[in-house]
Structures are given as structure tokens and as C-alpha cells.
Image: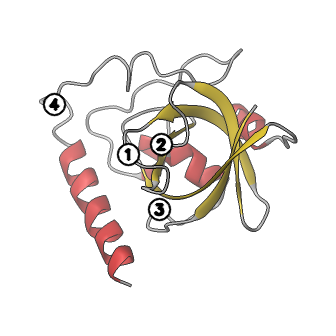
């Protein structure tokens, strides 16, 4: 229960701070150059005045359908608990300590839902947890305050 409470407060802080997007510098690695998928164009950065989930999720319906397309195989990297990552970082991605270099992959929930995404390195121990993009959470039909256990694959 304590972790969920922290997740809710974290979301409030992130969404509150998002109104200051014009004041906060974004590094190119996290926003402007974040790949979506091979063959897809980068999703645009949300507008600085974004307030709703729909405004923060700048992916198209076609991109969400493609990301949800069933994927099999790949190298299983392990499992991780994931929280919502920065909602101003566009596209489908998972920042995780399970990879040391950027790679294409997919994640599955324990219920079997999956999403294709870019795996991005995150400093920390393998069991330290991961951050999942807002569009990926929506494709997986997760609540933004959930801390789902995900199975991570490199494709």
C-alpha cells in the first residue's frame, strides 16, 4: 500500500511539474531523439500546456495498434516492476536496468498483454525497477498508478 501511495504522489508531482515544461531543459536523449520503432517516425513532444492523458500521449491510433501487435520470441531478459515514466517523453519505451544499451524489445504483463517498445538503459541494480512510457501503459491497459510486474524481452 505504501508503494502505491508513493506512485500516486509521484504522478501528482510529475503532472504538476509538466506545466513548467518551457522552463525545464530536456536532454536530446530523452525527448528529441527518442526512437519509437524502426519504421515509425518519432512521436511529437506533448504541448507545454498538456494536462490530460490524451494530451500527453501524442502517439497515433495506428502506432498504438502496431505497438500492440503480437510479438513472440526474443531473448527473455527478466522481470521488473514498472512505474509510470516521464509523461513528457514521447513514444513507446521502457527505461530499465535490464539493458546496458538501447535495443528493440517488448514487454508482457502477467496476464499476457504485450507491447513493442524501445528498451533504454537505466542506472541501477537489475531488481531496482523500471519506468514505462505513458503510451505503453495505455496499450497494456494499466492504471497510471499501477506498479505492474513485466516480463522484458529483447527482440
Which is more foreground, mark 3 or mark 1? 1
What residue lies at 38% left-to-right and 33% top-to-bottom?
A: 46
Q: Is residue 25 above or below residue 49?
A: above
Q: Is residue 100 above or below residue 57?
A: above
Q: Which mark identifies residue 124? A: 1
The answer to whether residue 70 is left or right of residue 92 is right
The answer to whether residue 112 is left or right of residue 23 is right
For the residues bearing labels 4 and 3, Cβ distance under 8 angstroms: no
What residue lies at 35% left-to-right and 67% top-to-bottom?
A: 7
- Name the spot of residue 144 as percent of width and height, x first: 47, 62
Which is more foreground, mark 2 or mark 3? 2
**Helix or strand or loop: what does disc 3 sit on?**
loop
Q: Which mark identifies residue 97? A: 2
Q: Mark 2 or 1 closer to N-term?
A: 2
Q: For label 3, count other residues whose C-alpha is less than 10 Å away and answer few (under 14), some (14-19) or many (20+).
A: some
For the residues bearing labels 2 and 1, Cβ distance under 8 angstroms: yes
Q: Quadrant of residue 76?
A: top right
What residue lies at 45% left-to-right and 51% top-to-bottom?
A: 53
Which residue is at the far front? 125
- Name the spot of residue 59 as percent of width and height, x first: 57, 34
Q: Which residue is mark 4?
A: 24
For the residues bearing labels 2 and 4, Cβ distance under 8 angstroms: no
Q: Mark 2 or 4 closer to N-term?
A: 4
Q: CA distance from mark 4 to mark 1?
A: 24 Å
Residue sitting nearer the eye, 5 or 125? 125
Location of the C terminus by quadrant is: top right
Amino acid at each position: 500500500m505504501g508503494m502505491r501511495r508513493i506512485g500516486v504522489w509521484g504522478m501528482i508531482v510529475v503532472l504538476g511539474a509538466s506545466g513548467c515544461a518551457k522552463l525545464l531543459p530536456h536532454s536530446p536523449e530523452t525527448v528529441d531523439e527518442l526512437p519509437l520503432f524502426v519504421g515509425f517516425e518519432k512521436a511529437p513532444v506533448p504541448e507545454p500546456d498538456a494536462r490530460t492523458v490524451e494530451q500527453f500521449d501524442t502517439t497515433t491510433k495506428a502506432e498504438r495498434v502496431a505497438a500492440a501487435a503480437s510479438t513472440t520470441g526474443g531473448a527473455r531478459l527478466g522481470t521488473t516492476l514498472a512505474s509510470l515514466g516521464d509523461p513528457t517523453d514521447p513514444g513507446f519505451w521502457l527505461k530499465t536496468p535490464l539493458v546496458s544499451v538501447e535495443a528493440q524489445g517488448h514487454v508482457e504483463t502477467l496476464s499476457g498483454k504485450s507491447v513493442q517498445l524501445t528498451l533504454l538503459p537505466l542506472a541501477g541494480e537489475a531488481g531496482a525497477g523500471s519506468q514505462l512510457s505513458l503510451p505503453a501503459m495505455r496499450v497494456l491497459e494499466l492504471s497510471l498508478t499501477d506498479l505492474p510486474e513485466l516480463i522484458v524481452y529483447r527482440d
